[in-house]
Image (cartoon, coloured by chain):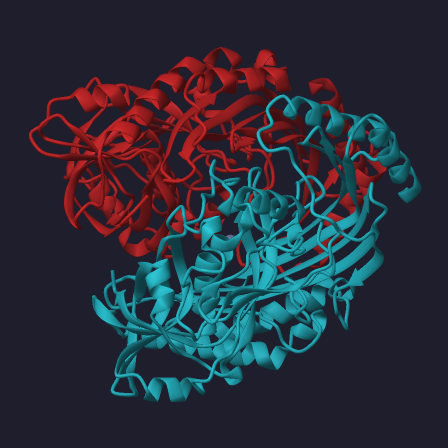
Amino acid sequence: MQKQIQQQIERIMAKGATYVDARWYPLDETSSLTMWNGNLKSAHTNRESGIGVRVLYQGAWGFCASSETSDLAVVFEKALENARAAAERVTFPVRLAEKDSIQASFESPCRVDPFGVPLTERVAFLSRLDELMAQAGVEQRMASMDLMRKQIIFLDSEGSQIEKRITEVFGGLRVSGRDAQGGMQVRTFRLNRRGETRGWESFDPDFFAQQAERIVRELNELRTAENCPKEDRSVILLPGIMFLQTHETIGHALELDRILGYELAFAGGSFVTLDDFGKLRYGSEKLTARADGTLINSPGSFGYDDDGVPTQNTVLIDRGILVGAITGRQMVEEANARAHRTIFNGSGGANRATAFYRVPIERMTNINIDPGQDGTLEDIVQATERGIILDGDRSWSIGSNREQFHFATEIGWMVEDGRVTGVVKNATYKGATVPFWNSLSAVGDASTWSVQFVDNCGKGQPNQIMQLGHGVPVCRFDNVRIGE
Amino acid sequence: MKDNILHLLQTLRAYAVEKGYLVSVIYHEEDSSLMRFANSAVSLNTNEHIIRLGVEAYDGRRRAEYSMITGLDDLDEMKRGIDLAVEMAHHAQPLGYDMTIPVFKQDFADESAFDPALAAMSSEERLAFFNQAVAGLEEEELLLSGIFSSGVNIWAQINTLSEHTQYFQTTDAQISVVLAHRQLKWEVTAEQSAQQKADLNPEALRRELAFLVRCYKEQPAMQLPLGTYDIVLGQAAVADLLSTMNWIGFSGGAYKRGFSFLSEEQVGQKVFSEQFTLVDDPNRRETFPFRFDFMGMERQPFPLVQKGVFQGFMWMQDDADEFGMKPTGHTVPARSLVMAGGDVPVATVEELARMPRERDVLYIPFLHYMNIVNPSQGVVTASSRFGALLLKRDGSIAVPYNVRLTQSLLDLFGERVAWVSSVTAPYNTSSSYGERNPTAVIVPMFMQVNGLEISHSNSSY
Ligand SMILES: [Zn+2]
């Protein structure tokens, strides 16, 4: 098959294309289980295979995908035809940053293949947790497990050939119950990075049982809690909400295609301009953020992106100054040309597609915040006069240029004079992105840092769902409006 | 095409019957085209022809599903898929309730929302449409973005309990045209939903864009002071709010699970404005409707709100089975929401701007990134985007920077509703997550709601 693909690439190049690549997915499988109040509501396996072809012709992209791989010529021809049509309206001819020709393979770290575990065993795992969560105060309980595996073979007209085998595991627990006013309160646990591999070994029954006990306990605290007040306070974000803050107001804001206006039809743009690189104060001096695709064991580490570029560890914000972005081969060339200076030295290796039938676009790898010098969570609480600790993402809404945001969380703990005084429900906070990051006043040490997995980041048209990670510490921000 | 698909389903059914299986088979085929524009160029031109087969297998109270992307002639793989679904069901855990398995009592085929002319549109025609929609409006700093998404969508179903089949074939187009200022970062949009090629009207898009561009170029821009405003919501904003309401308001399952802001006690009560009437009407072709649901139940217009009075919840089969309720024909991939027009005959934003007014009015055409802050209270939050205007009392117009609204749906559609436009049109709410599934809501062009608070106001575009 690789040989046939190679021949097609050469054939299309001979017809005048300046670049061609193909991603062949021999297997792309997901297997999901959802148990809701003891009912196995969904046991669903999905399998796909096919090929996606990108052709660059006279500075314009054409793409075509098919699950039918018996006649490859048709797919390649259609991609060329689409590029020819697109070439009728070109304003900035696409150029691709230099890269090496690579022959390599990548396999995500996995000790026990989760797809090898019998369905009955997987169901029994969830069933036990479901029973554990069936306690007083819990009206709805949900336990879920999502497994993915992909085999991707990438070939391009520059001589690269890369094979990737990726296994992902996602799991979660959720309980909900009514408070005294009849409002529904929710507490959630999501499986994140544990150790250096992710396979069936991630589903540690004892660990999940502890988390089930904890979220049930916290739900019952929420059910009798006061409402979050509407006022200004310091917010102390635990990783269960800090990851989302980072995702929405650093990650998406620094996707270079958004910055260059390629997502304006739908997802939106970014308040960041090309002039801002090297200058903009994007956070206090305590903030260093990076796009680290080399982090061990995360969905945001995938070896090579869908341009065939190795993943990298790129600093985005260096002690509060904007220095980098999330980039692929096309966008760095365009950005440097538009800025009339070299902002980006080659692709950052972050161009990815969700499936064989989607085109690669700039996606987050692991968008991380470096641990800081402000000690443990306890240290940060002790050093806080009037604050609130927040955890869990209940809703998120962000301005179209990522300039402002509103988040609802699952739980808040009020802090007065360095001590936790009690739980509040319906806790929300909002802010404007740059002033918010500039108000960062404490960054927790490595003991507070953990890698959160994201399985559902949406972007692009047609929409693409992507898996990635966020390594984040506990952080405190001052003078934040809560309770609105 | 149809005959081939139905023949395939009969073949698969015969295989399953012979093996003694109890299964439903759902066939989904999309032939999608997307031309995407950015920075005044075609940034992507793509086609996907994808066939998906879904098999749901039943074994007593056990149930499992296997789906695949496949080729129409790959019969062996499809049969393997059926075997796998059956095996999975065998190892699943029994439900705590009896489930209803679909039985089709008759053959049903609906191709009335299929238009061969729309299906056959070429890349060149899509590009020509866009060129017409923005003729004379692009400038060096004013750049075109947008999509022309169109396609053919087919659903077909059979199961082992009867030989009858259901077949739905539609064409749809979703068009949005954006003009955005590269330096200043303001952006305006005009959108269109089409079921047939004759629905396409690039000139209407051009007129709307031309008016908005003129306002944004010529009128003063300002940061709005926080406070309460009389707000006119445009078609896109109303459609988005109704889609959210569909999810956390009218679903019986969501209500029983505690995630609805409406309750059984409110059925028959006046909960909303007298000017708010909403129905799920599968007879409206523009909504890409399902006239039978996936359980084989014939769908009739289903009133949800009549002059502000809540009429009742929609029950999907599985929720109805679990909670001991009667299904209402809502086991469908998308509903056909139709909001009734009111009595103010205003059809375009230009007409809206010319309307006499006693107070300043904030026009918000589009709500970006709506999310649910508190489902029990129906509280949602979102920001304005794409061409908001401050229509001043003295007849002049200013351009406001974007603002955030955090409000309950009970207020947005409650007593604060001042007026509703008598002119309605379909608004395309299709999401392209996973598979193509055309969806549109029919909504009035405008709805004014008085005394709404804005909770955040940007200091620039
Ligand atoms: Zn995201």
Quarter placement of the C terminus of chain B: top left
| Quadrant location, the N terminus of chain B | top right
Which chain is tinted cyan?
Answer: A
Q: Is residue A415 above or below residue B353?
A: below
Question: Can you see residue A176?
Answer: yes
Task: Give the x, y percent position of residue A365.
Answer: 61, 60
The structure residue drawn at horizontal position 51% and vertical position 35%, both measured from the top left corner, is: B332
Spot occupied by residue A466 in the image (x, y as percentages of width and height): 60, 53
Q: Name the spot of residue B75 as percent of width and height, x first.
A: 82, 34
Looking at the rendered structure, the number of numbered marks drawn on it comes to 0
Residue closest to the eye, A422 or A376: A376
Judged left or right of residue A235, residue A231 is left
Q: Nearer the viewer, residue A394 or B326?
A: A394
Task: Let me know if residue B439 appears in the view.
Answer: no
Vertical arrangement, residue A330 with respect to residue A370, above or below:
above
Residues A345 and A234: in front is A345
Left or right? Give the position of A426 relative to A96: left
Q: Position of residue B179 (x, y in %)?
A: 42, 30
Name the residue at 41% across, 75% down.
A475
> For the point 42% across and 59% down, which residue is it?
A280
**Which chain appears red?**
B
Please tell me whether residue B424 is drawn above or below residue A261 in the rendered image. above
